[in-house]
């Protein structure tokens, strides 16, 4: 499996009819590599789960608000996730790229701190 975009192999066939046959790296079918050819390599970004942790003090309504505000959840989804965290100890808010996850964790912790709630939010890399 490769999702690399490889313009070197983009001329459609392994034999373009060029003199001497097509060579690996024969991007323009002339039989010669161009010094200007660029291999464009893309990689899927790693993803990170953002998790909320239960505690005994943060009001349920505050947690629901956090989920609506920062994780774009409906009132119903937010309530379900909050109750899951309340009952199981931990629950998934969403899955994001590194910097988005990092920002969401910081937003949650900042708002919780400003309201003097001990709510904890962490991120962990997906396998
Ligand atoms: N356990 C809290 C209470 O009973 C509610 C709560 C839910 C707190 C989820 C944190 O991530 C949390 N008020």
Image (tube, rainbow, N blue to C red):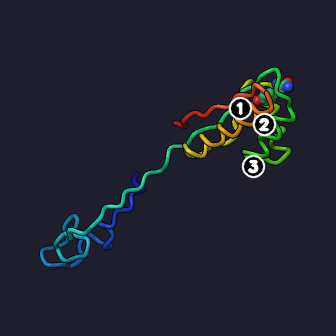
**Residue at 39% from the left image edge and 54% from the top image edge:** 2
Q: Position of residue 66 (x, y in %)?
A: 78, 40
Cβ atoms under marks 1 and 2 closer than 8 Å: yes
Q: Which residue is mark 3?
A: 72
Secondary element under disc 1, as helix, strand or loop, is strand
For the residue pair 47 and 24, the one nearer the viewer reads as: 47
**Residue at 31% from the left image edge and 73% from the top image edge:** 11
Cβ atoms under marks 3 and 1 closer than 8 Å: no
Secondary element under disc 3, as helix, strand or loop, is loop
Q: Position of residue 82 (x, y in %)?
A: 80, 34
Q: Which residue is mark 2?
A: 81
Q: Determine if the C-beta at disc 1 is less than 8 A from ligand 1.
A: yes
Q: Which residue is mark 1?
A: 52
For the residue pair 108 and 37, the one nearer the viewer reads as: 108
Mark 3, Cα crowd under 10 Å, few <14 / some 14-19 / many 20+, is: some
Q: Residue furthest front?
A: 114
Single out the mark in the foreground, 2 or 3.
Answer: 3
Residue at mark 3 to residue at mark 1: CA–CA distance: 15 Å
Residue at mark 2 to residue at mark 3: CA–CA distance: 12 Å
Q: Earlier in the sequence, mark 3 or mark 1?
A: 1
């Amino acid at each position: 499996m490769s999702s690399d975009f490889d313009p070197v192999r983009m001329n459609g066939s392994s034999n373009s009819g060029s003199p001497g046959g097509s060579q690996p790296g024969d991007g323009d079918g002339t039989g010669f590599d161009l010094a200007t050819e660029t291999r464009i390599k893309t990689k899927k970004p790693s993803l990170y789960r953002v998790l909320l942790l239960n505690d005994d003090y943060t009001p349920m309504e505050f947690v629901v608000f956090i989920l609506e505000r920062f994780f774009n959840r409906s009132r119903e989804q937010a309530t379900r996730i909050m109750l899951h965290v309340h009952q199981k100890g931990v629950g998934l808010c969403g899955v994001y790229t590194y910097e988005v996850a990092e920002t969401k964790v910081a937003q949650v912790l900042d708002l919780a701190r400003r309201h003097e709630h001990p709510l904890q939010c962490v991120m962990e890399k997906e396998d």
